[in-house]
Amino acid sequence: MIYQEKFELSPDNQSYFSMQFDIVVTGFRDDEDERHVRFLKDLKDFDGKIYCFDVCEEAEKFHYRRHNADGSEAVSENNKSLIPDLEKLLRSENFEGARICVDITAIKQSLLFLLTKILLKSIKPSHLFAAYTEPLEYKKKKMDIGDTEEFDLYNKIIGSSKGVPGFYKAKGSKRILLVASMGFDSQRLQTIYESLKPQELIPIVGFPSFVPGWNLTAIKMNYRVLKESNSYDLLESCEAASPFGIYDMLKEIYHRKSEEFDIYICPLGSRPHVLGTALFATDYFPSVFLIYDHAVEKKFRSQDVLRVNIYHLSKFIR
């Protein structure tokens, strides 16, 4: 089946998309966070169910809130085990065979990885979409002498030693290739690179980026690890807003490199790149390793909205 994969949500098509979803899944954020609320705010005619999910910093427990689009029949539960309770919940709440849209704007990455795997491999909705609200600007730090970070994005980094729920895998015996989409933080990729000690690094930068120049910022913030790993010549670019583009790129790298290397994939870039990585890792696990450092994001990381994209992911349901 050939169909359009990416749409920009607009006043002209919001009524159509409002009728395409039975369930919308989103993250927990303050309602004052404009990007978090924008998708549902623009989906004016949606009258299905909304599920808000959050996960603890250690990615072991989750809690959720369910309510109708008008706010009625609100139900919430806390301290559920991510494995196996998330899959049990989705089954009991009739996600199987439903038309589902996951708003990835504020949902935590460690939850998004497992949720993607469960939906594609176990629950299998009839149709699956994702939505993402692009930022116009990220909040910058007040720079002091000696500071290296330009942006104020995270409260702390838990680290990558805990693994990714649903993607735990024993270490292989081949040489290690690290494939990493780069973000704006100068320490995250550097720390993972030094811990993993790969023989080769393929960095991926989001280009075209949401805002012109952000790709150059990502390269600048990761200058040290790019230099240390001699990986400038291996730098790949992929549209920051495209989960499909990075999926195809990872697939090409896998088929080219998997006989020689154990391939570790580390998504530190844009949320659409995280989604594309989750789709790829779901399809190719356990042949690839998924590594993530469980960054704890600040509540208000960005300001103003560029656009809202909707992605049609039904072709990935196997």
Image (cartoon, helix red, strand yellow):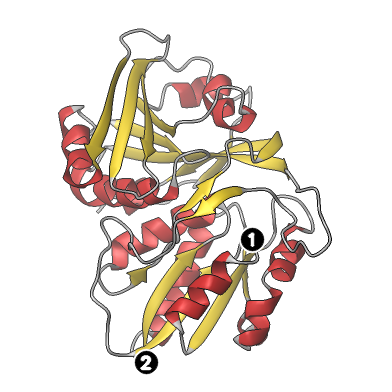
Q: Position of residue 25 (x, y in %)?
A: 39, 32
The numbered dot on residue 300 is: none
**Furthest residue in direction right, as rendered:** 145
Q: Position of residue 29 (x, y in %)?
A: 51, 30
Q: Residue at x 43, y 70 (%)?
A: 265
Q: Pointers 1 and 2 in contact (CB under 8 A)?
A: no
The numbered dot on residue 185 is: 1
Viewer-side label of 1, 2: 1
**Furthest residue in direction front, as rendered:** 145
Comes first in the chain, label 1 or label 2:
1
**Residue 68 vertical position relative to residue 271 in the rendered view, above or below:** above
Q: Position of residue 5 (x, y in %)?
A: 49, 47
- Residue 33 position by quadrant: top right
* Amino acid bearing label 2: Glu
In this picture, residue 143 sits left or right of residue 231 = right
Cα–Cα gap, marks 1 and 2: 30 Å
Q: Position of residue 28 (x, y in %)?
A: 45, 31
**Residue 243 vertical position relative to residue 225 in the rendered view, above or below:** above
Q: Quadrant of the C terminus?
A: bottom left
Q: What secondary structure is marked by label 1? A: loop
In this picture, residue 162 sits left or right of residue 237 = left
Q: Residue at x 44, y 44 (%)?
A: 108
In this picture, residue 143 sits left or right of residue 266 = right
- Residue 289 position by quadrant: bottom left
Question: Disc 2 designates what residue?
Answer: 260
Please name whichever residue, 280 or 303, is drawn nearer the observer in this view of the structure.
Answer: 303
Q: Residue at x 66, y 37 (%)?
A: 307
Please name whichever residue, 254 or 231, is drawn nearer the observer in this view of the structure.
Answer: 231
Please name whichever residue, 61 or 112, is drawn nearer the observer in this view of the structure.
Answer: 61
Q: What secondary structure is marked by label 2? A: loop
* Amino acid bearing label 1: Asp
